[in-house]
Image (spheres, grey):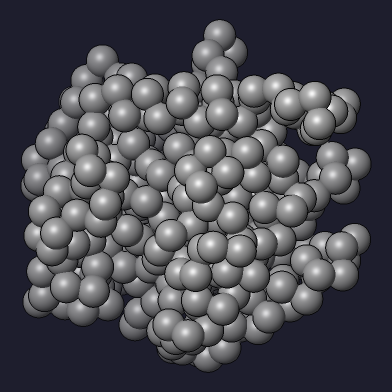
Amino acid sequence: MHPMSTADPDRAELDRRILAWMGEEEAAEDEARFEELALELFAHQFARCEPFARFCRARGSTPKNVESWRKIPAVPSGAFKEMELRSFPREHERHVFRTSGTSTRRRGELHLDTLALYETSLLPTFERHVLPDLGEPSERMRIAILTPSPLEAPDSSLSHMFGVVLERRGDEESGFLVRRGELQIKRLLDGLERATASDVAVLLCGTAFAFVHLLEAMECAKRRIALPGGSRVMETGGFKGRSRELPRDELYRRLHRALGVPPDRIVNQYGMTELGSQFYDSVLRFPGTSRRKLGPPWARVRLIDPESGDEAACGEIGILTVLDLANTGSILAIQSADLGRALGEGFQVVGREPGAEARGCSIAADEMLQRRTASQPRESGRDHPS
């Protein structure tokens, strides 16, 4: 576990209180606690991240008049591709996570001065929704991860997350199955067959596209494996920017045929590089109920009507906006480019709004990057931190 930042006394105290909540056994929802911490964190970031402050002022929002976490302005996730949005001095930076992309395409970046909140947030949420039947914290499981390791992909938040999970919950035969950009098919299948012969349940984790590669290889080789009871799959991501697409229902049916894992034991994760917390399908934690995304008590989701900018009516489709207390060193309120609808205490993702990120990012960047007036002279490294 990484030490928390202590460079700023106010920030250190916020981190301490949020980490205490994350560390509580079966941490519970607490609206009053969330409201208090969110407003304090908003004021802290408003004072220390000038681009964010300008973005908020353009919407008439400041810590003096924002009285609810629901009114904190949310920065479009695309803005993280345009500038460095951090609420701490650059010299205190310890790690950077980057969104997926190519060398010719600008990638979004999450700048961190500590990994303590990210790691402390991810573990209980993962365990609660992907490993709800594992008992003591010392109990281990066979975990096969279809991504590169953190050593091979140090700027991947997903690889880092899996590395933490592997260290905490993986047994001695667990590991990463992508090397130098290639899925190690033979090694993976041989390991799955050994686990099946020994009646050892397996958790397979990876991106949707990695699972497509696995399925194609198994179908080409005419191989099927019936994994032992208790096995499960956690998949994340979609097919954005890929030449092939596969509906999620079809992906789950093919995984069931190839590996014997039924759809109600396949969990989709919803997350963004720009966030410190993640959300998971409810199917393992609450079997037999409607599939919906659930997250930790220190994060909230709002669904915003793209036309009015107000909160979407119950059951109506809106743009997913996340407020995450794990983002103490960055920006706590982020607007995604994804569409969803509320379902019970959770939500469902229904797709992406065409052009939403590009439009929102353009407006946000313009507001964040505009020069201050003559009475507010620009300071080097603040208006244009990138």
Q: Residue furthest front?
A: 375
Q: In this view, does 137 lie above or below 166?
A: below
Q: Which residue lies furthest to the top in this view?
A: 104
Q: Is residue 289 above or below residue 61?
A: below
Q: In which quarter of the image is residue 14?
A: bottom right
Image quarter hosting the C terminus: top right
Residue 233 in view of the camera: no
Count the marks. 0
Q: Is residue 60 left or right of residue 222?
A: right
- The front one of 167 and 160 is 160
Q: Name the residue located 57 percent from the left edge and 33 percent from the top edge.
A: 80
Q: Position of residue 374 (x, y in %)?
A: 80, 24
Q: In which quarter of the image is residue 314?
A: bottom left
Q: Where is residue 141 in the image (x, y as percent from the top left)?
A: 45, 71
Q: Name the residue located 56 percent from the left edge and 9 percent from the top edge.
A: 104
- The front one of 21 and 50 is 50
Q: In which quarter of the image is residue 283?
A: bottom left
Q: Where is residue 170 in the image (x, y as percent from the top left)?
A: 53, 66
Q: Is residue 341 left or right of residue 133?
A: left
Image quarter hosting the N terminus: bottom right
Q: Is residue 198 above or below residue 158?
A: below
Q: Name the residue located 59 percent from the left edge and 83 percent from the top edge.
A: 21
Q: Is residue 242 left or right of residue 17?
A: left
Residue 383 in view of the camera: yes
Q: Name the residue located 59 percent from the left edge and 24 percent from the top edge.
A: 82
